[in-house]
Image: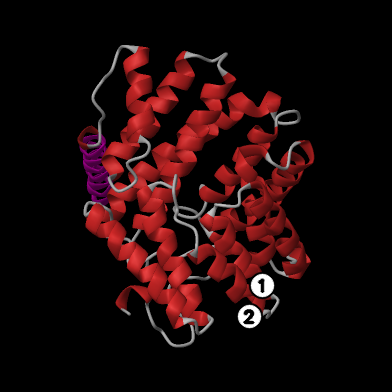
Amino acid sequence: MNRVHAAICVALLAAVTVARAEKEADAFACPPIDDPEAMAERFAELIEIKWDRQEMGCGAEYGYRLATMSPDDLELRLAALGAQVAYLDALDRQYPRLYQAGELGGELGLRWNVTRERGNALLESLEPFEADIAEVSILKAVFLLASVSQEADIQEEFAAVPPALRALEQGLETDPEALDGLGLMMLGRLKIALPVFSGGNVDEAVALLRQGIDVAPANLEMHRWMVEAHLGRRDDAKAAEVLASAASLDGAGINPQDLADILVDLGGLALRLQQPELNEKFRQKRQALFREKPYLLQRKSTAKLGHGGVDPLTGQDPNEL
């Protein structure tokens, strides 16, 4: 009798869990759009709204739908995969850093897993082109790394690195300037983060990121990782020089939420380098951005493949100075 009761309880619990998941999925549903042209317009618009996870999530969904509707459109499939990567990055920044249970954690986990499934499906459809098209290899690597930054165990995180490294190296061999140097930046980041026995090498990271800055001289994120690379070599003078160069850039063309986030990282690097004047420049730029666009998320940015943000020695936060 007890076994029967236990089985009934398990079945009821499973039914409640499924019903709850279906209810949550319905809450995140995107308005249906039948016209492909209208859907493409909404895709382009919504995928840039990085401060609203519902709106951006619909952008990622519409991109995926468009790609499945036009299986012969390689450019559209690449754009759709890039959208899934961008959405994973936006979600990753919204995850609670210490305690992920509760309503927010459940919502983010649901969104994360759906986005990862879409990305995997797009990757599978792009596999025949990987050897010849640099953009495919590079986006594959970025997706593999992004997809395990949440909702994955440590073994999955480690397992994603070797194929990502191979894909990046292959993409750079085909076209190092593809995607405005994204492959150079991502490989540089890995070279900074990985231990030597796994392929880490800060000297190689500096060379890659220097090449990346040549390809995209106005890319603030490229400068941010170059600072990290010089810090990895314990060359504070070079790091400060690159940081000062970043402070002179206006961030034109960068998504405003991305700009707000990277200014936190740059301010944190200024604190680590004991450059209060540079930190003040980044802080003022960020505050001006929030005055102009008060709807942006005023979050504290951290990076899984590096440092930035709060000074690890003093505990100072560039947002609070």
Task: Residue lying at the far front in this picture: please name it.
Answer: 248
Q: Main secondary structure of the magenta part?
A: helix
Depicted 149 relative to depicted 231: above or below? above
Magenta stretch bounds: 1-25
Q: At numbered mark 2, what does the secondary structure look like: helix, strand or loop?
A: helix
Does residue 151 appear to the left or right of 307 in the view shown? left
Does residue 3 appear to the left or right of 226 in the view shown? left
Q: Which mark is residue 219?
A: none
Characterize the local packing of mark 2: few (<14), some (14-19) or many (20 or more) Cα atoms within 10 angstroms: some
Characterize the local packing of mark 1: few (<14), some (14-19) or many (20 or more) Cα atoms within 10 angstroms: many
Q: Which residue is mark 2?
A: 236
In x, y percent, where is residue 56? 33, 39
Depicted 88 relative to depicted 39: above or below? below
Q: At numbered mark 1, what does the secondary structure look like: helix, strand or loop?
A: helix
3 magenta-colored: yes
Check if mark 2's residue and mark 1's residue have beta carbons within 8 Å: yes
Depicted 27 relative to depicted 157: above or below? above
Q: Nearer the viewer, residue 282 or 55?
A: 282
In x, y percent, where is residue 102? 24, 58
Q: Which residue is mark 1?
A: 230
- Give the amino acid at mark 1: His
Separation of disc 2 and disc 1 at Cα?
7 Å
Residue appearing at x 37%, y 58% in the figure:
260
Q: Which quadrant of the figure contains the C terminus? A: bottom left
Q: Dividing the picture into quarters, in which one does residue 175 lie?
A: top right
- Give the amino acid at mark 2: Asp
Depicted 134 relative to depicted 148: above or below? above
Task: Residue lying at the far bottom in this picture: please name it.
Answer: 314
Residue appearing at x 77%, y 36% in the figure:
174
Q: Dividing the picture into quarters, in which one does residue 176 lie?
A: top right
